[in-house]
Amino acid sequence: MALLSIKNLHVEASGKPILRGLSLEVDPGEVCAIMGPNGSGKSTLAGVLAGREGYVVTAGEILYQGKDLCAMPPEERAREGIFLGFQHPVEIPGVANTYFLRAALNAVRKHRGEEPIDAMDFMAHVKAKAKSVGLSPELLGRPVNEGFSGGEKKRNEILQMSVLEPRLAVLDETDSGLDIDAVREVAGAVQALRNEARAIVVITHHQRLLDYLVPDRVHVLSGGTIVASGDKSLAIELEKSGYSSAVARTSAVGGAA
Amino acid sequence: MNEPLDRDAYADGFARALATMADQPSWLNSARRMAFSSFIDYGWPTTKDEDWRFTDVSPLTRMLLLPRPPAEEIALDGADAFDTRLLAVGATSHHRLVFVDGHYHRQLSERQQHELGDGLVVAPLSATLARDEIPAARVLGQLLRDQTAFISLNTAFMTDGAWVRIPAGLVVDEPIVLVYLASSGQSSSFPRTVVLAGENSQATIVELHLGADGAITTANAATEIVLESRAKLRHMTLQKAAPTAFHLSHLAVEQKTESEFSARSLSLGGRLVRNDVHALLAEEGCVCNLDGLYLAAGTNVVDNHTTIDHRAPRSTSREIYRGVAQGRSRAVFSGRIVIRPGAQQTDARQTNRNLVLSDGATVHTKPFLEIFANDVKCSHGATTGRLDADALFYLRSRGIGEKEAAQILIRAFMTESLDGIEPTSLRSEIETAIASTIADLAAQDEKDEKDERHDGSQPAR
């Protein structure tokens, strides 16, 4: 069974249709890339999956592990294993990064029927994780994302993913604002989190990220629907000839396998 | 509407109070008489007075605010009645005096010997006054004149309080902790704190004003502080009265050349809270920082009025007040900055930030700048808003429940005003105390909502 199954999804924001009949299936263990021009609905898809306010699902459905995702508040989705890597991670003055991470992890653990993690154990755990994603341990004690550089913010997202161990991670433009070296490092950190049970949906403009995080499938989103699907070679082709030609040449609609 | 002042009852009460103060110096008793007559002459403030526009004191006018007569020992009906986390703030300090309903409580006080070899004096005011010490007379009644009914009442009725004298050059590491407890039934208390910080001295003073749960107490506190040249003094007031209680306070400070004063006012509870701060930067090169934090919940009113008066050149003032209002409460901030002729190169900044958590809560904020000198910097800014929706979503998207996420953000907003509290142990004690207050507030908010829904379902009669 697919981990995530989106069928004929129509979504509006401020009364304007953004997603128009999007269908997509993501299997456990799969890394799929969603590419597309600005305004095609990529970030809307990410927001809808995480439960961001302001979107109205007017038709279609999203099933996650067979359950109706739209009926769940954002925190429940997270506890059930969905993780959104934000394109623009939010700065939260006055809340220490470690405090935030521990509160999040304990919320997820509680949902799974596990005991809260001990503060000392947690610090050791999170320090090791920070090292593995290349985030300076000094940033752990600072307020969440406050004064972080663009790269540090994105690494902090991957740190959260690594601590929370989601079943489905949706990474929204995780490569945006990063220089070439940082893209390689961040992609490497995500690659290290790949496993058989976990699905990763990578939303990106550029195929560079996919050089280091090679997707199993690539989908092209345009005008609120998937217009083309293929493997890694589709991403390379897009990089060469642009979205417009790919969109024009392909008539495939829906979640082609 | 204010009740008319019951002059006879007050005159009676005043005569009885004076009779218990026979051992006090005659200059003080004549000051008390003058204060009392100005209280009788002027009466209660009304909402027609600009300074009291948003704060209706009529519930106070229905009571008779008289001091509790001195007793051998006032029994505390269990410390449980007070917020134990707040009571723990500074509890380990060796300079700690405890007052219950305006009277010194020897057993609860840490500091038994009031003068140590280093010259630091932390003593009950009553003992000092009985000996008529000149230094206390230099401060007491000099800064707080009888401008309002409440200052007048404090001067007329003050039963006790603290006298703190920090000798020139002394650096006091441990915080000096003054605990004022309002314990019983409908009692009123009139604590007075008098501080003289000598040249080049350094110290931290914490005033804790706590009210017993469920009591309809009225605390009417006044504090006068003089900082001599280059003295550095941190002053903090932590106030948590019961939701049924009243708290009024006046803090007046006078700063001499190049002295540094920081005041922090944390108002965490009370049905009606009014805090007035008046800082006079009398001589050159002073630094004055006023930080405030106030919480208004239920139908409470919390009103902060501050004045920073720059009278001499090259002084700096920074003022940041933060407030949280929920339920159907009202929060008021009025920040006045005066820059007198001759106070060139003054640098004054004022900020007021408010977090409004419900539709029913109201915030009034009023900056009030009076600038009579050129070559000065003076700015103010005020914001009033809801919890940041993006931050809330970010927290929730990581599995943190909506209510917990809101609490985390409220706590973050509030703890920002704790920055700079030293020693850090004091800061963490306060942070713990505030965390529990926020949790209580959340519970109260839920109850308010439930009550409101209940109100709404009442059939019309």
Image (cartoon, rainbow, N blue to C red):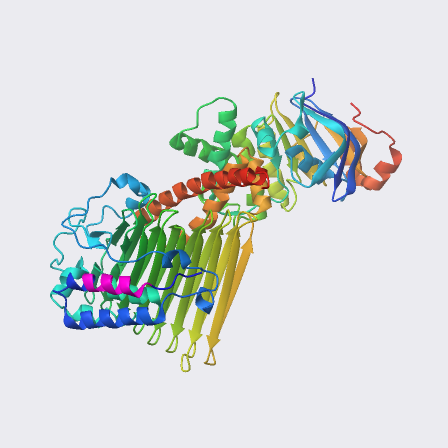
The stretch in magenta equals: B6-16
Task: Give percent across and percent down for residue B118.
Answer: 14, 60
Whether B15 is among the magenta residues is: yes
In the rendered image, residue B162 lying in the magenta stretch gets the answer: no
| Residue at x-position 47% and y-position 22% | A114
Residue B177 on image: x %, y %: 25, 53
Whether B112 is drawn above or below A113: the answer is below
Main secondary structure found in the magenta portion: helix
Residue B448 point in image, percent of width and height: 50, 41
Work out which quarter of the rendered image holds the C terminus of chain A and state it.
Answer: top right
Foreground of the two, B201 or B19: B19
- Identify the residue at horizontal 25%, vertical 61% (top origin): B193
Q: Is residue A16 left or right of residue B196?
A: right
Q: Quadrant of residue B16?
A: bottom left
Q: In the rendered image of this protein, does residue A4 appear above or below residue A18?
A: above
Residue at point 13%, 68% (across, down):
B132
